[in-house]
Image (cartoon, coloured by chain):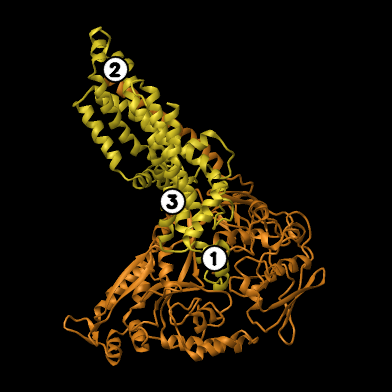
Amino acid sequence: MANKKWLSLLGLALAFMLVLAACGGNGASTDEEPADDGTDEAAGPQQGGSVVLGTSGEPVTFNDLYSQDTASSDIIKLIHASLLESNEELELVPMIAVDLPEVSEDGLEYTYTLREDVVFHDGEPLTAEDVKFTYDIFLHEDYTGPRAGDFTELESVEVIDPYTVTFILNEVDASFVTRSGYGILPKHILEDVPVADLEEHMEYNLDNPIGAGPFVFETYENGQYIEVSAFDDYFDGRPYLDKVTFRIFADTNAELLAFETGEIDWMILPATEYKTAETYDHARISSVLALRYDYIGWNNNRAPFDDVRVRQALTMAIDRELLVETIMDGRAEVAHAPASPLSWAYPDGVTEFAYDPEGALELLAEAGWEPGADGILEKDGEKFSFEILSNDGNVVRRDIGVIVQQMLGEIGIEVEARQMEWGAFLDRINPPNYDFDAVVLAWALALDPDPTAIWHSREIENGLNNISYVNDRVDELAGGNKQIIDQDERAAVIGEIYEILAEEQPYTYLFYPEQHMLLANRIEGFTHHPRENMYRLNEWYVTE
Amino acid sequence: MINYIIKRVIMMIPILFGISILSFAIMYAAPGKPAILNLDPEISPEVREAQAERLGLNDPVPVQYMRWLGNVAQGDFGTSYSRKIPVTDMILERLPNTILLMASSLFIAAIIAIPFGVISATRQYSLTDYGVTVGSFLGLATPNFWLGIMLIMLFSVQLGWTPVGGISTIGADFSILDRLHHLILPAFVLATADMAGLTRYTRSSMLEVINQDYIRTARAKGFRERRVVYKHGLRNGLIPVITMFGLMLPTMIGGSAIVESVFNWPGIGKLFIDATFQRDYPVIMAITMFGALLTVIGNLVADILYAVLDPRIEY
């Protein structure tokens, strides 16, 4: 009797769950498939349809002047339009400007002529006044955003006529033109908001951003998704897609699962998941070299890394080819200098240190390091022993630490590979602590190759030169590089800096990684930009 | 009774006060700065410094605490560092999702655990009893995140019955069925740990009741066993179980943090985890205090319920 009861209860519970699963399942499958009014034969781009893109970050603001995370800037790029943008070759090309700026003889005036057919999403035309309004905010003393220091060379912005605007600098700055990529804000909406309040003016920044970009902001559900729709009056033609949805995930694992089940159509593919994604029938992988390099930074302020011979020996003892083969599955290039091969400033040839453990030992012996009784190198009774730090959650960097530990162990150097939580990790490697021996990290590079921020000695105390690298010649060259307008001349100066840095090995430059994007086969018109995730989404279309 | 409640409510104040000091101290002792100061290395140190100054992060911790306390006294939990909107808005935005998840999981836990507990008690030392015992310990021992991932692999990826996460189908209009469809897995996972405890609790409570004199009397009167157990026994046996619900509430916020992260459920728990990694102090403090408040209120409600349900208890 009681047995029956038991069974019926269990049955009830199961039935309850199945009913839910079944009902919901129907709902999802009908909703998930976007209505596509295109025909089956893929004859060129088709209008209509929608895509769902995966993202693992929560956007903060859709105002370009205050954004400092990729989740925000990915969407900003869709909503807003800027004077110039960079193409997939990393060259600056006009966007709402008719052409590249006209630069005056003395290099202090940049004049842009604007297209006259650009309108904001509310129908108002975008004019030189809006450009001035936007860039004046950077110059305002109440500006609270992250770019305050970037515009010290900008003296003023002048409106010449409704579609011509001139930027006047107080000092020659060859990198200035790369700052023409900020999304132009609508003056008619924001002019009454005090600059001091603009950063927290969420009414515009988050709830209703109006730009002149290809897509119109629709909704943002915190923790869930962001939706944008095609802007019919976009100056470069209406985007093919009707709707684009960004779905927010907690991490890339969840994203990949959703991709596998067809819930999303696009995601950035971590190198570690490449093999898994290769097996998908419904998707393809696009790869290009990313504008970045991975490295091991040696604390130049700490013995024994203050000796250039030791640093060179360490590089020679690390088999970077093998690292690329094992950790990156061959999808990276060994690096020799702190610059990307994609950059125009990348030098033709710099000093290269090949894998040579014997040579490393010789160099170390020269520096006074000899094997002790236990096989560990010693100098003045001190063992060659240090800790190599990386942040947890990053499998690639963890593996680099472990493999380097083994490689250096083979020539008698004792290494402990250690991982720390990101916040605590930054605390140790950043000013004022600098409490580390060696660190595995990577730099994503800016469009302008100015090396000052990382390599100038004045950036040690409070900047990005956290390995305390000092070289007077580098200081001198870096200090003046932005005043050289001629790109070839400037490339030569920057090239000399790279040569010194390649010779002195303040970092061991590991590799230039590829960047992968995973996209559903139904997506066409995709262009892979090495630096931007959402490049030319207005040219995407779907085939069903 | 009224006096007792008043006394208890007054006692909550120093408790919450103590919790706030402790959590503030621990939060600031942890290494790492708010993410807003760490983001984007291209941003110049001067700008970061100005930001830290504006947020008051350069002040000594006691000063920061007093400022926080002063604002909280006026009902202001501050503005999130990372999202720049009031923390109260953020919590209110996420709270309904968490409540829905917790309520569903409590419901699932109750409808599964209580019957199992009763059956287990009435058939003590039988095969069923052992089965239930083993099952509930398994449930207790299985980590939520692992179970969550396994169920996603099975039901979402292999069978395609449920979505891999999130709260609703993107782009679809709101529908209750769609919400339940997204809810079922996370609610079930969150329920498993509580189910185990609840089953054991129901079982022992029922065992105690079944051996009471009045049950024996009922049996002696010739009532059928089922009526004896469910009519006379269950009512009394459930008293301690119901009070347990009050105590389960705050622990579920902790548990839901993990489940919400696994299933990408945009609730308080996930907000808390994100805030912790970003060192978003105002958000961390607000959620901690919210959890603390729930705990003390949960305790109070449990005690009051106990008194209401069991007239033998006096205060």
Give the residue drawn at x 26%, y 28%: B204
State the residue position of label 2: B229
Say which element carries label 1: helix
Secondary structure beneath label 2: helix
Disc nearest the viewer among 2 and 3: 2
Q: Residue at x 53, y 79 (%)?
A: A453
In the drawing, what numbered circle is on residue B52? 1
Q: Chain of mark 3?
A: A
- Same-subunit check for callouts 2 and 1: yes
Q: Which amino acid is tagged 2?
A: Val
**Residue closer to the observer: A34 or A439:** A439
Q: Give the quadrant of residue B302.
A: top left
Seen in the picture, residue B128 relative to A529 is either above or below; the reply is above
Tint applied to chain B in the drawing: yellow
Q: Is residue A360 above or below residue A533?
A: below
Q: Are marks 3 and 1 on the same chain?
A: no
Q: Is residue A173 above or below residue A262?
A: below
Q: Position of residue B11 (x, y in %)?
A: 42, 39
Residue A209 in picture, x, y percent from top left? 67, 55
Chain identity for the colour orange used in the image = A
Nearer-the-camera pick, A350 or B58 = B58
Quarter occupied by residue A315:
bottom left
